[in-house]
Image (cartoon, grey):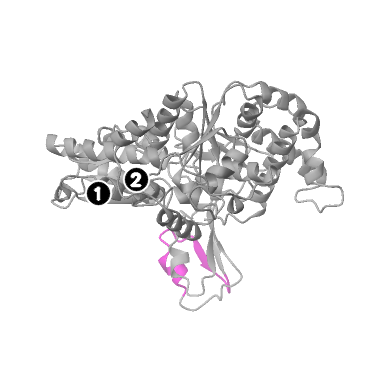
């Protein structure tokens, strides 16, 4: 996994901060033109062929950060024109991803390569174990790529680790084969297969796979003050900022949001409903049920594992239930979900209760633009305190545990967790699908409640995080322990909200 501390992530943050500062100052249309030359000054060493090429790539990145699909933009477009259109835009546009071909390295097809560490040894295990006789040795091993089938046995058998695999990071990271090369050798996304897990965006070392930001849209509503703008932050957000409960709420209000909801409250509603649904399904005789809060997983089932469709819980996501509470409190408000997930942007487009979705990267840029330090904020009073299990939805195993503690009889539970929808995770999904369809016989220990998270480690490891997994989990644990109820139910939440 590509470390989040990298140059591409820093440039992305820099662009977002500059856009936000210009917009708050009322100078976005006038100032956006200068962002490429400010980021790439004349005396800076170029990354590509020259600084003018570098600036052109920055210009296209700016367009994506203003919410536009690069594929639809004309070569000679003016940033000011697209800034004006962004400020007039009524809603986000499909799809949530865009590919910057100018940044794409057009990586060669994944293959194995012999390095100069090869000793041309007498044992020659690479040659002896190659099933296609694609390796010859003359003081140094050589691979005939016309014969090689990329099985990797040569690499596994080399005692000097002299054979390496050269991957195409975005293609390797995509668990559903949605990314392939076009006729020019650059990568393209097949949206009929894509589950919007964000792996390609996270793993591309050239930052060519980009999410289309909705930050300009949200800031516009904050500045217009025509309707109240409500922030709904996911439990995973607490793992990204070293804050205690109450501080993040104040930071968001100081950034311009009128009110704040913690989505862990929606997670409590979700857990209550899933526990009840699971009991009803088991009583009815269903084979299994899966969780439904991860929208990347739900889309993976819809597109790639139809045998599991009937097993997916009918319960909506915590984002939806929180938006429902926010709209009940103020039907005319603008709801803005804040989380680590790309797939939530797709879910938000399809949910009438969710107006916009911001990533942790974007909210971090917003705080920097407004010079807000979350850790120095006063500890305000929370609108509603969720349970610790609701906040733990953010990490792998958390949803399952939240449902378990709400069951009347835990003896009916046979749990399983799929921690990450990489290729191995997708294989497990397909196995469960075959079990449900009867192609694979059920066993006494076959799981009947399966939690699935597209991101390994859970939402705290989403594609738009600003903190690495282990530190994020440690911070989430502190946040959960800092203050949350042991248990609450959906009826109590509805009653408190109506009051």
Q: Position of residue 75 (x, y in %)?
A: 74, 29
The answer to if 126 sits in the magenta stretch is yes
Look at discs 1 and 2 and give the one toward the viewer: 1
Q: Earlier in the sequence, mark 1 or mark 2?
A: 1
What label does residue 452 carry, if any?
Answer: 2
In this view, the residue in front, 236 or 113, is: 236
Q: Secondary structure at mark 1?
A: loop
Q: CA distance from mark 1 to mark 2?
A: 18 Å
Q: Residue at x 17, y 49 (%)?
A: 410
Q: Secondary structure at mark 2?
A: strand
Q: Residue at x 55, y 41 (%)?
A: 359
Q: Position of residue 76 (x, y in %)?
A: 77, 27
Which of the image's four quarters has the C terminus? top left
- Residue neighbourhood size for the residue with mark 1, other residues' Cα within 10 Å, grouped as few (<14), some (14–19), many (≥20): some
Q: Residue at x 17, y 44 (%)?
A: 408
The answer to if 136 sits in the magenta stretch is yes
Q: Is residue 123 visible?
A: yes
Q: Is residue 191 visible?
A: no
- Residue neighbourhood size for the residue with mark 2, other residues' Cα within 10 Å, grouped as few (<14), some (14–19), many (≥20): many
Q: Which range of residues does the magenta coloring cover? A: 124-140
Q: Which residue is mark 1?
A: 405
Q: Position of residue 202 (x, y in %)?
A: 55, 48
Q: Residue at x 39, y 40 (%)?
A: 265
With respect to residue 430, does 348 lie above or below? above
Query: Image check: 98 left or right of 352?
Result: right
With respect to residue 180, does 154 lie above or below? below
Q: Position of residue 355 (x, y in %)?
A: 51, 27
């Amino acid at each position: 996994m590509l470390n989040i501390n990298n140059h591409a992530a820093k440039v992305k943050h820099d662009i977002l901060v500059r856009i936000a500062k210009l917009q708050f100052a009322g100078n976005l249309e006038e100032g956006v033109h200068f962002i490429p030359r400010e980021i790439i000054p004349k005396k800076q060493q170029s990354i590509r062929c020259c600084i003018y090429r570098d600036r052109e790539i920055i210009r296209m990145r700016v367009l994506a950060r203003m919410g536009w699909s690069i594929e639809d933009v004309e070569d000679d477009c003016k940033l000011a024109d697209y800034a004006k259109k962004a400020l007039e835009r009524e809603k986000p546009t499909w799809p949530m991803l865009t590919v910057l071909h100018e940044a794409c390295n057009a990586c060669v097809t994944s293959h194995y390569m012999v390095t100069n560490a090869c000793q041309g040894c007498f044992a020659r295990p690479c040659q002896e174990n190659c099933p296609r006789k694609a390796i010859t040795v003359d003081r140094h091993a050589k691979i005939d790529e016309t014969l090689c089938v990329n099985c990797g046995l040569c690499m596994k058998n080399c005692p000097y680790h002299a054979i390496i695999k050269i991957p195409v990071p975005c293609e390797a990271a995509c668990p559903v084969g949605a990314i392939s090369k076009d006729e020019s050798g650059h990568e393209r996304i097949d949206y009929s297969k894509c589950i919007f897990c964000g792996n390609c965006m996270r793993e591309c070392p050239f930052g060519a796979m980009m999410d289309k930001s909705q930050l300009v849209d949200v800031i516009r509503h904050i500045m217009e003050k025509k309707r109240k703008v409500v922030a709904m932050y996911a439990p995973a957000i607490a793992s990204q900022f070293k804050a205690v409960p109450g501080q993040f709420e104040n930071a968001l209000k100081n950034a311009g949001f009128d009110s704040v909801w913690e989505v862990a409250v929606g997670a409590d509603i979700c857990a209550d409903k899933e526990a009840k649904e699971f009991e009803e399904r088991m009583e009815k005789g269903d084979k299994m049920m899966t969780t439904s809060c991860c929208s990347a997983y739900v889309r993976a089932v819809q597109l790639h594992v139809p045998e599991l469709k009937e097993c997916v819980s009918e319960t909506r996501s915590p984002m939806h239930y929180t938006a429902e509470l926010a709209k009940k409190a103020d039907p005319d408000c603008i709801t803005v979900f804040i989380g680590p997930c790309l797939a939530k942007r797709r879910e938000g487009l399809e949910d009438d209760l969710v107006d916009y979705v911001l990533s942790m990267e974007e909210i971090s840029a917003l705080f920097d633009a407004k010079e807000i330090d979350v850790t120095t904020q006063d500890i305000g009073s929370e609108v509603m305190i969720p349970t610790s299990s609701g906040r733990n939805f953010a990490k792998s195993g958390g949803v399952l545990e939240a449902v378990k503690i709400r069951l009347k009889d835990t003896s009916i539970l046979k749990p399983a967790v799929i921690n990450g929808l990489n290729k191995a995770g997708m294989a497990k999904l397909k196995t469960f699908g075959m079990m449900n369809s009867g192609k694979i016989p059920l066993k006494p220990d076959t799981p009947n409640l399966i939690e699935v998270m597209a991101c390994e480690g859970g939402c705290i490891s989403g594609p738009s995080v600003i903190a690495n997994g282990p530190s994020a989990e440690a911070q989430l644990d502190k946040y959960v322990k800092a203050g949350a109820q042991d248990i609450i139910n959906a009826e109590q939440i509805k009653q408190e909200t109506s009051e």
